[in-house]
Structures are given as C-alpha cells and as structure tokens.
Amino acid sequence: MKIAIINGPNLNLLGKRETDIYGNMPFEKYLDELKTTFPRVDFHYYQSNVEGELINELQRVGYEFDGIVLNAAGYTHTSVAIGDAIAAIKTLVVEVHISNVHSREDFRKLSHVSGKSAGSIFGLGLKGYELAVRWFVDK
Ligand code: DQA
C-alpha cells in the first residue's frame, strides 16, 4: 500500500527546532524507523515550506494513494486552501501534530485541516505518525 507523509513549514528543522516542544529527532531518521515498523508500506515523504507546493502534492497523491498523513504545521491554522484541497481529493487524510495544539496558544486551536480529515492526532510526539499509518494499515 502507498502512504504519503506530507510535512509543512519548518518541519525540515525537526531535531534542531524548539527541541523542548518537538524533540531531538530529525524526521528523516524517524522515517527510517517507520519503514522498519511497516516493511510492506510504500512510503512517499514530502516536505515543503511553501503553501502552494503542499497543495500541489496533496493533489498529486490524492487520487491514487491509500492514505495521506498530513502535518500542515503553521498552515493548519491559516490555510483555507489546504482545507479545500483535502476536501477536493479522494484519498483520506489523517491530521497529525507533534505537539498538543490545544494546550498552546489560542491561535493553534483553529484547524482548517481537522474538519476535512478522517481524524486527527496531536500531542503524542512523532509517535502520532506511526499511529496514523497504523490506522490506514488496519483499515
Ligand atoms: C505543529 C503545531 C503547529 O501549531 C506548529 O505551527 C508547527 C508544528 C506540530 O506538529 O505540533 O509547526 O504542527
């Protein structure tokens, strides 16, 4: 099965960005662990800091992949267009946030992604990605 993991802005800095919130592990290293945990899953990883590029990627994978795990990062709280893209495509999306967005600043409580997604996971660290993939695999 084909699963796309799409990470939004600043998540290329995982491991060196606000490590008290986001931890010490670069995402590429975590992805290697995911691939070991799910040897039969064909993972496609994409990260961009650019809103339109994230939308292009959602549209690219959104008709033939079996699942999309999306951490739209800061765009979660601002991007009507990313929400529209999720609504437009056929592949289900699971929203993931590393931190608990509901225990932080108020502006992080708004998500343009949640209402268009199959479900949301937040506050469980990088483990949230594994749980999202597990959901697609078990489905
Ligand atoms: C984040 C939470 C967002 O509020 C923030 O802008 C991020 C990361 C998370 O994974 O916890 O960049 O999506």
Image (cartoon, rainbow, N blue to C red):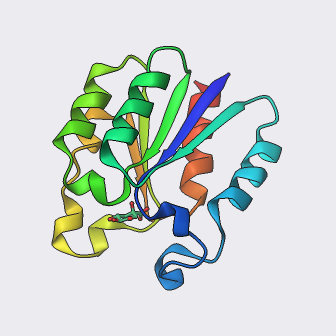
Depicted 23 relative to depicted 42: above or below: below
Q: Residue at x 65, y 67 (%)?
A: 26
Left or right of residue 98: residue 37:
right
Left or right of residue 9: residue 43:
right
Ligand number 1: quarter of image: bottom left
- Closest to the observer: 14 or 119? 14
Depicted 83 relative to depicted 96: above or below: above
Location of the N terminus (image quadrant): top right
Left or right of residue 69: residue 1:
right
- Closest to the observer: 36 or 4? 4
Q: Which of the 4 image quadrants contains residue 63?
A: top left
Location of the C terminus (image quadrant): top right
Q: Residue furthest bottom?
A: 20
Q: Residue at x 21, y 47 (%)?
A: 79
Q: Which residue is drawn at 60% across and 58% down?
A: 127
Task: Give how far across and how far down residue 107 sits, in percent.
Answer: 17, 67
Depicted 39 relative to depicted 107: above or below: above
Task: Give how far across and how far down residue 134 sits, in percent.
Answer: 63, 38
Q: Which of the 4 image quadrants contains residue 28?
A: bottom right
Task: Give how far across and how far down residue 116 sits, in percent.
Answer: 27, 33
- Closest to the observer: 136 or 71? 71
Q: Which residue is drawn at 73% across and 30% down?
A: 41
Depicted 27 relative to depicted 55: above or below: below
